[in-house]
Amino acid sequence: VNQATFSEKLKLVFGGRFDVINYDDERADLNLLTGQIEPSATRRNYEKFSPMVGVTLAPTATLSLYANAGQAFAAPSSLTKGDPKPEESTQFEVGAKVRALNGRLQSGVALYHLKKENIGIPDATGITQQSGDQRARGVEFDLSVQPVNSWHAFLTYAFTDAELTEFREIDTFTQQLVDHSGNTPVFAPKHILNFWTTKEYAIGVGFGAGFRYVSSQFIDEDNVFEIDSALTFDASLYYTFRNWRWSVNVKNITDAEYETRGFGSTSVMPANPRAVYGAIDFSL
């Protein structure tokens, strides 16, 4: 990676990465038809160059604009059956960052477009043997405010529009090929919103509070079952004296009931209920 500075306002970053991957796996598998243990081997070799380039323009001391593009490469999981192609992705991003009020207010916004090809997706049995293409685009926003030295507030928001541009799988019940192209990828909520604020007093006591919102999301590529949206609240209280710090954190204050990831395409797990954590830290 190299950076070229043309002026205080204009910088260019460019570079690349070259991967050479040789994978050999000697093992024994159970033949489900004969019931016999049979030796098997998997050998995969990949070579790939992934370039990247970015430019930053700062028209003023408080505003910077940037744009970047790049490619990425990843060998398929060793659990993927058959002879899969490596996963490749291409990303484009543009954004802006602002500093105001002598740094007490900082904000940034980014727009991106990401395309992945040959991604491995487990089937209903949990075996990774399919591959598909996926596209994601969205907006990310962050805001940091410091009204006074002892008070901080942070807000982040992300909007994601994700789609399986090409994905087909064998239905385990009908044994028919089903086309899920156009569906939403699993665990890809459209909206994620986070807020957190902390206030500290001169006597060493401080507290924090905030919330997190995650919109609904699907648990399988067939988009049949959906996890509902969730809004949770957290808080913390701490006391600092010399090298010691005592803290108490309360998670999910309202004891909201919601689900997280599950097993397979028809199950989910309940998220953690209200919980209280305590900690004592000592620093030299």
Image: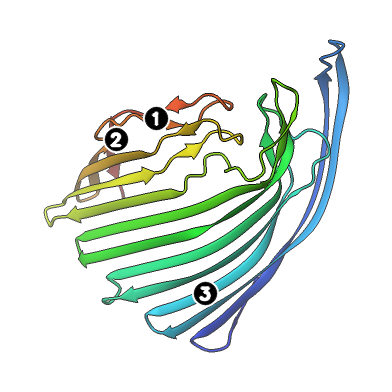
Q: Which secondary structure, mark 2?
A: loop
Calculate the distance from the C-alpha at mark 3 to the C-alpha at mark 2: 37 Å
Q: Residue furthest left?
A: 203
Q: Would you say 92 lies left or right of 38 here?
A: left
**Mark 3, residues whose alpha carbon is within 10 Å: few (<14), some, or many (≥20)?**
some
Calculate the distance from the C-alpha at mark 1 to the C-alpha at mark 3: 38 Å
Amino acid at circle 2: Asn
Amino acid at circle 3: Tyr
Q: Which residue is mark 1?
A: 271
**Mark 1, residues whose alpha carbon is within 10 Å: few (<14), some, or many (≥20)?**
some
Q: Which secondary structure, mark 1?
A: loop
Q: Would you say 235 lies left or right of 202 here?
A: right
Image quadrant in which you'd find residue 181: top right
Lower sequence index among marks 2 and 1 = 2
Image quadrant in which you'd find residue 228: top left
Which residue is at 70% across, 41% downward? 167
Which residue is at 41% across, 49% downward? 192
Calculate the distance from the C-alpha at mark 2 to the C-alpha at mark 1: 10 Å
Give how far across and how far down residue 89 sits, in percent: 68, 56
Which residue is at 12% across, 57% downward? 202
Q: Which secondary structure, mark 3?
A: strand
Q: Which residue is mark 3?
A: 66
Q: Which residue is mark 2?
A: 252
Amino acid at circle 1: Ala
Lower sequence index among marks 1 and 3 = 3
Residue 211 visible within the image: yes
- The image's mark for residue 41 is none
Q: Are marks 2 and 1 in contact (CB under 8 Å)?
A: yes
Give how far across and how far down residue 111 sits, in percent: 51, 64
Lower sequence index among marks 3 and 2 = 3
